[in-house]
Amino acid sequence: MEWVRDTTGRFSRRPYYQQTYLDQQCERLLFDFLNDLYGQVTIPVPNGALIKLIERDAKELNVYADLAEGIHGVTYFDPPRKPKVRIARELFTESWRVHRLRFTLAHEYAHVRIHAPLYNSAGIAKSEDHKCKDEEIEPSDHKVDWMEWQAGYAAGALLMPVSRLKLAVEACLGKGGDSEVRADSSKATDLKQRVSEAFTVSAEAAGVRLSQLGYLHNVER
């Protein structure tokens, strides 16, 4: 981790995390929590565990919040107090949105865990709410707001821990995997589907995570 200039103007400097660092930190935090909670590492991560993680580190959590259309989650930073988290009501009431619910819970927890300390250490007195829109929950590149990218990456790392994801990839592709699985190939479709089933995430989220870790490639011919 290193500190770089924050071009958004929130802070004078902000942290830049290597993906491997986020993977290691998220897996360690998650596995410790699951072992304490259930006496074992349970994958897929139960929804209840994601809720309990937020409740542990946030001031409060409202999972039936009435949010504006297109807003799935909001984290209210209010230093020096712990942040508050709101999750859109429809993610809980509409069962077909289970994948979006899980990713939103993990995404908002990442804001609580990673970004709340920044507000506290920066000595910012005013409160600030960070709204997470549909297209920002699972960012696939660095072109989005850095806080959204970090939260999106960490959410994927929490739901699809790197060591367990590797096992799923090896089961599909064989030990060592395939060095050039085209993202648009039938093999990639099969891999994304298996990861989706194994971790209870959307095939889209699985594809983003697999691409970020180098298992899928957009190969020019």
Image (spheres, grey):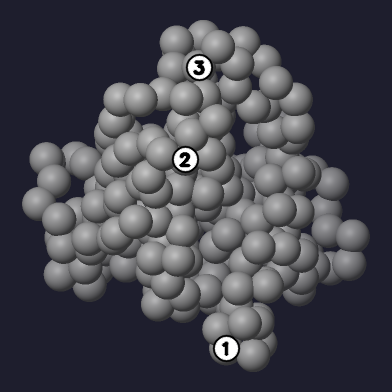
Residue 55 seen in the figure? yes
- In the picture, the disc for residue 38 is 1
Tell me the distance, in whole angstroms, between the alpha carbons under discs 3 and 1. 38 Å
Q: Amino acid at mark 2?
A: Ala
Q: Give x and y (percent) for residue 177.
A: 83, 58
Looking at the image, do the residues carrying marks 3 and 1 touch, with CB atoms under 8 Å apart? no
Q: Give x and y (percent) for residue 39.
A: 64, 90
Q: Give x and y (percent) for residue 41.
A: 65, 81
- Give the quarter of the figure containing the N terminus: top right
Q: Which residue is mark 3?
A: 11
Callout 3: helix, strand or loop? loop
Tell me the distance, in whole angstroms, between the alpha carbons under discs 3 and 2. 12 Å
Q: Which residue is mark 2?
A: 116
| Direction from residue 56 to residue 128 in the image, left or right | left
Looking at the image, do the residues carrying marks 3 and 2 touch, with CB atoms under 8 Å apart? no
Callout 1: helix, strand or loop? helix
The image quarter containing residue 77 is top left
Q: Amino acid at mark 1?
A: Tyr
